[in-house]
Image: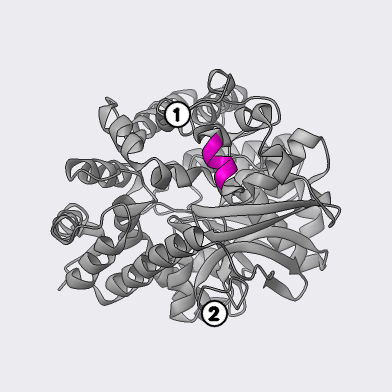
Amino acid sequence: MKLTFIGGGGVRTPLAVAATLRRAQRLGLEELCLMDVDAERLHIFGALSREVASAAGSPVRITLTTDAREALEDVRYVITTFRVGAERGRVLDERIALRHGVLGQETTGAGGFAMAMRSIPAILDYSDLLEKVSPGAWIINFTNPAGLVTQALRDRGFCRSIGICDSANGAQHAVAAWLGVDEKRLRAEVFGLNHLSWARRVLLDGEEDVLTSLLREPAFLDGTLLRLFAPELVQAIGMWLNEYLYYYYYSDRALQEIAAQEKTRGEEVLEWNRQLLRQLRAIDVAHSPQAAREAYNAYMARRVATYMEHDESAAPSSGQGQQHPAGDGSHTPSQAPDDEGYAGVALGVIESIETGETLYTALNVPNAGAIACMRPDDVVEVSCLVDGDGVHPLPIGAVHEPQELLMRTVKLYERLAVRAILDRSRATAARALMVHPLVLSYSRATELVDEYLAAHATYVGAWE
């Protein structure tokens, strides 16, 4: 079997490759292809990935290419994890939003729309090519904003597409770590949208709900990213909160704190990535693989340690958790079990489809009746059963009105955003952003659209 990563020159690729190689035998994997439009980054992180394979003694052939057709020919699964405009695009997205007095977060609100403007046309081009050269192949999408991009794929009619996110299974990871049990014994009831989801229960062995009591346990809250939220808020809602809900429930604090920082998160990441690339160029991976791995591991440790750091400094604390950002029983959402990150989610899905072994996980898929208030073709983030027959969303039914109204509002924004991007329409884009709870104003939405189109003209072209 051949598996391809589109965005193979990304900094997380060596970790994803390591995770993939650990599962290679179970997947029947023969070739792992890394594709990227940035030849230098592909060369550097491809070389590091090959060193990972060599150290593991893996027989899997790792190929590198900048040619999309070559990457997609004879492939069974494609994992998309690319960033059009690279880190510089993220910086522009964040800074433009902040100049207009709205949250500058890369996947949520105005910043998320700007990223979608660049991501959606690119992934649709890849999906069209994939249909020609490898009909029947799957796209497992991690390109952000993941839910919105997956909605566009589904609206285009590409049915073998799934959206994945590190944070979708945060409740299951946290509860398993806290209780010291195998995650396979737990089933979380997750519902919502990407970066806008809740888990209302976590069942142990399919029977006992173990989440409800933990939400009243201060030590548990402080040992997880629930420490971002006031304990009384968590208890009032009575569910696990995806950490990105912080931007909605604390929108004023989040905006104030991010605006007060000397650098946005994107600017930090841009600087760190440049430093890492300079180090790896100087080291030369082929000649000093150990030094290259050490430099890379130090970089990743820094990234993980500072996840949502801007937001934690403004968040309410119920105890000591703020001083221990990786407190007992927790890990960041950028890491799945065994540090496999997004690759662990994608590979779990692939393995279940290939082997028929049942997997319970939260994914971004068409609702198909799972959540009562959402349309059948709405891409939602929901608990799913994955097996040899594919992906099946599990029934959630009715949800509480506050969650329903927020979900429906943001989904309206998403549908308008997809339409705007496909039609290249300024007017529809402004309508989309004015619907979003973090923008709302028509005049502000119009200015944001105009400025984003000007900033990213190289990638998005002219709009009507």
Q: Amino acid at mark 2?
A: Pro
- Disc 1: which residue: 309
User: Where does residue 217 sit, x and y in percent of width and height?
Assistant: 69, 32
- Disc 2: which residue: 376
Image side of residue 217 versus residue 230, left or right: right
Vertical comparison of 182 with 293: above or below: below
| Residue 49, image quadrant | top right
For residue 332, the mark is none
How is the model colour-coded? one colour
Residue at the (58%, 27%) spot, across then down: 297
Which image quadrant: the N terminus? bottom right
User: Where does residue 254 sit, x and y in percent of width and height?
Assistant: 35, 36
Residue at the (47%, 56%) spot, across then down: 143
| Residue 319, image quadrant | top right
Q: Nearer the viewer, residue 443 or 279?
A: 443
Q: Are marks 1 and 2 in contact (CB under 8 Å)?
A: no
Vertical comparison of 284 with 108: above or below: above
Vertical comparison of 61 with 266: above or below: below
Q: Nearer the viewer, residue 326 or 275?
A: 326
SS assignment for the magenta stretch, majority: helix
User: Where does residue 6 sit, x and y in percent of width and height?
Assistant: 50, 57
Q: Amino acid at mark 1?
A: Glu
Image side of residue 401 versus residue 463, left or right: right
Q: Is residue 233 magenta?
A: yes
Highlighted magenta segment, given as a residue range: 232-236
Q: Earlier in the sequence, mark 1 or mark 2?
A: 1
